Image (tube, rainbow, N blue to C red):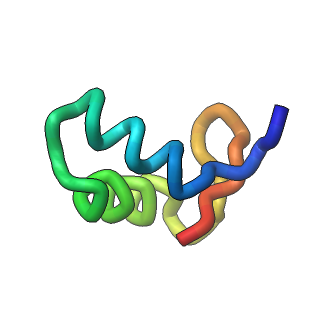
Amino acid sequence: MSQTLTDQDFKNAATKLSCSEAAVRAVAEVMSSGIGKSSRGCRITG
């Protein structure tokens, strides 16, 4: 299983949350605090 979030992961999250992909990416960027990893340890790429 890949530890990197893909474009498809962002699209899937946006669909599930009924919001834009840009909003999901913005939240991911802010929540990663520049560390580049989610709370699950997945690397966040933009």
37 versus 9 height, above or below: below
Q: On the picture, is 18 further left or further right than 37?
A: left
Residue 33, relative to residue 42: is it above or below? Answer: below
Instruction: Please tell me which residue is depicted at 23% across the width and 57% down the height of the picture.
Output: 23
Of the pair 33 and 13, the residue shown nearer to us? 13
The residue under the point 43% across, 64% down is 29
- Where is residue 25? Give x, y as percent: 37, 60
Tell me the residue at 61%/58% (across/down).
44
* Count of marks placed on residues: 0
Give the image location of residue 5, x and y in percent. Answer: 62, 50
Q: Which quarter of the picture shows residue 43? A: bottom right
Kindly indicate the quadrant of the structure image that contains residue 40.
Answer: top right
Give the left or right position of residue 30, taking residue 33 as reference.
Answer: left
Point out the residue furthest to the left here: 18
Identify whether 21 is placed above or below 3: below
Q: Quadrant of the N terminus?
A: top right
Q: Could you tell me residue 42's position as x and y percent?
A: 70, 44
| Depth check, front residue: 23 or 29 | 23
Q: Give left or right: position of 11 versus 42.
A: left
Residue 16 at what x, y percent from top left? 28, 28
* Foreground of the two, 30 or 18: 18
